[in-house]
Image (spheres, rainbow, N blue to C red):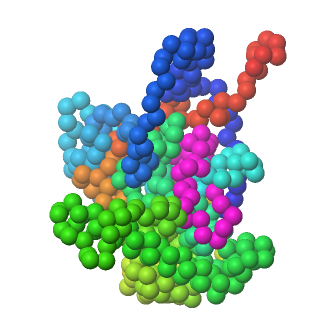
């Protein structure tokens, strides 16, 4: 992953949202004495009761304000079927209300899209925005906890900086949601988080409602290099596999202990007698909570989805064997440059291949990457996802999909825009566990929609408008709807050059 420097100049204008935020900060700072007086006169409050650990970090996302919008005369790629020529789509109450030949309801804003295209919002299944933010500096590198081969206890969301200027730049490329993952230094690197691409003070306000966590795992060169250079396991691929299996054995035992504890509590509540060998103290003894094993147990319970960094075909097959041994499922292999070698297996297993369009050869395990990877997978009926793994690539996911589609055309495969749009919309949504809510233009789904100036698979096309849950999040032609973060404001010299900033 590239750690890109800040690429966009600071904006001199603030959106109304930022003005409100700065105003609140200014009023708070203006009255320190009053705050001190309140503290002195107020009795000390009792400590708060700890909250349910399963709910305290829940999404606090609130959709942008919206009103009915009817987009007319557009070429529509629904990601759920054939294209619709000169079609209409109605966004209402934050949802897709109708698609096809639609009449405008009273009070709706009508957008004439003659000569333009409409697609679902793009979804990036492999992002490091916020955990490797711009400006790229060691102080901002918060995506790899390289202190232990297994760090399942860490959550990427606890590193995400919402002020990363790369979020609005990606929004301008049509990306409405993304999965932010820890890096790949570890065998098991921790939980990822799925977010909506909206301005926020805190990551909780970006978290996609109801999205499951993903568990980042990594095969191959990265973990064995990072820890082998430290003179500790793993330093070989067989050491990698031993490390995964050891972690899953421990997690299975942890899960068993909690399952038996909950069963004892249930039986006690229902008045059932305990077994003769169980004492009352045994009944009441709560297992010690372990954050790492708790995450792995969540995978075994099917609540957390495995997102597995893995390049070589043989290693993907080994990871599938490990998943069978311990009874969990792999949602996607990420990067997967050799996925084409086992396209039939991935199709049969229902595992997505989250891949680059054309990155290959930058290390030994990437040498067998080919440009036709996506096309071969598509032909085999596998789930194809084009991802970024890079802040700049994320700004042009549509062009990345176009490159992969073109490579397929060169080898004689008839891959249509109707097929390729799925690689950057509904397929990543499915691999992230949110395909029932977004990723396609189907009635009842979230109104995450992009209006393109032309064919989105043309290098000349750009996103003109982006709606998230029916709210206009970006408008290329309206400066007030081109969000900038507070960080981009920078320090501005006074016009009289008096030195104040």
Q: Is residue 218 above or below residue 128?
A: below
Q: Position of residue 248 (x, y in %)?
A: 50, 77
Q: Is residue 473 above or below residue 211?
A: above
Q: Is residue 195 left or right of residue 30?
A: left
Q: Position of residue 238 (x, y in %)?
A: 64, 87
Quick one: 487 or 38, which is closer to the camera?
38
The span picked out in magenta is: 143-171
Whether residue 417 appears in magenta in the rendering, the answer is no
Q: Is residue 123 left or right of residue 434?
A: right
Q: Residue at x 41, y 77 (%)?
A: 328
Quick one: 132 or 459, which is closer to the camera?
132
Q: Position of residue 25 (x, y in %)?
A: 57, 22
Quick one: 43 or 448, which is closer to the camera?
43
Magenta segment, prevailing SS (helix, strand or loop):
loop
Which image quadrant is residue 143 in? bottom right
Q: Position of residue 416 (x, y in %)?
A: 41, 70
Q: Is residue 280 left or right of residue 423?
A: left
Answer yes or no: is residue 78 visible: no
Q: Residue at x 39, y 56 (%)?
A: 211
- What is the quadrant of the C terminus in the image? top right
Q: Is residue 301 left or right of residue 501?
A: left
Q: Residue at x 49, y 67 (%)?
A: 293
- What is the quadrant of the N terminus in the image? bottom right
Q: Residue at x 65, y 34 (%)?
A: 488
Q: Is residue 480 above or below residue 420?
A: above
> Looking at the image, how many numbered discs can be counted on the residues?
0
Q: Is residue 129 above or below residue 360?
A: above
């Amino acid at each position: 992953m590239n750690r890109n420097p800040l690429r966009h100049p600071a904006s001199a204008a603030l959106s109304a949202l930022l003005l409100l935020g700065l105003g609140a900060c200014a009023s708070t700072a203006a009255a320190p004495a009053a705050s001190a007086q309140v503290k002195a006169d107020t009795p000390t409050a009792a400590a708060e009761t700890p909250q349910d650990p399963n709910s305290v970090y829940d999404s606090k996302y609130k959709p942008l304000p919206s009103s009915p919008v009817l987009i007319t005369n557009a070429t529509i790629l629904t990601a759920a079927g054939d294209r619709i020529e000169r079609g209409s789509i109605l966004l209402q109450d934050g949802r897709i209300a109708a698609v096809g030949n639609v009449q405008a309801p009273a009070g709706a804003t009508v957008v004439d899209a003659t000569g333009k295209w409409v697609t679902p919002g793009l979804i990036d299944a492999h992002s490091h925005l916020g955990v490797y933010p711009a400006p790229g500096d060691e102080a901002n590198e918060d995506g790899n906890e390289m202190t232990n081969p297994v760090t399942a206890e860490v959550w990427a969301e606890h590193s995400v900086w919402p002020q990363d200027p790369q979020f609005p730049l990606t929004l301008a490329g049509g990306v409405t949601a993304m999965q932010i993952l820890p890096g790949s230094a570890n065998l098991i690197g921790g939980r990822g988080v799925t977010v909506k691409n909206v301005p926020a003070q805190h990551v909780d306000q970006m978290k996609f409602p109801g999205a499951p966590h993903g568990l980042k795992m990594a095969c191959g060169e990265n973990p064995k290099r990072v820890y082998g250079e430290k003179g500790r396991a793993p330093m070989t691929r067989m050491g990698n596999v031993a490390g995964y299996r050891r972690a899953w054995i421990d997690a299975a035992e942890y899960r068993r202990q909690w399952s038996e504890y909950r069963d004892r509590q249930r039986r006690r509540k229902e008045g059932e007698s305990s077994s003769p060998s169980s004492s009352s103290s045994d009944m009441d003894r709560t297992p010690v909570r372990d954050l790492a094993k708790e995450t792995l147990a969540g995978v075994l319970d099917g609540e957390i989805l495995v997102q597995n960094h893995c390049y070589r075909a043989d290693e993907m097959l080994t990871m599938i064997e490990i998943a069978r041994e311990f009874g969990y499922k792999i949602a996607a292999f990420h990067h997967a440059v050799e996925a084409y070698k086992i396209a039939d297996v991935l199709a049969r297993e229902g595992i997505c291949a989250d891949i680059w369009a054309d990155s290959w050869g930058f290390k030994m395990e990437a040498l067998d990457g080919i440009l036709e990877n996506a096309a071969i997978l598509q032909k085999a009926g596998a789930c194809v996802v084009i991802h970024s793994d890079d802040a700049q690539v994320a700004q042009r996911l549509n062009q990345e999909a176009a490159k992969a589609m073109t490579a397929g055309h060169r080898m004689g495969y008839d891959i249509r825009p109707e097929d390729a749009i799925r690689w950057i919309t509904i397929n990543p949504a499915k691999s992230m566990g949110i395909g029932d809510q977004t990723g396609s233009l189907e009635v009842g789904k979230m109104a995450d929609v992009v209006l393109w100036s032309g064919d989105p698979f043309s290098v000349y096309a750009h996103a003109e408008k982006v709606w998230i849950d029916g709210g206009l999040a970006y408008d290329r032609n309206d400066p007030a709807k081109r969000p900038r973060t507070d960080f981009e404001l920078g320090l501005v010299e006074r016009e009289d050059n008096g030195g104040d900033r």
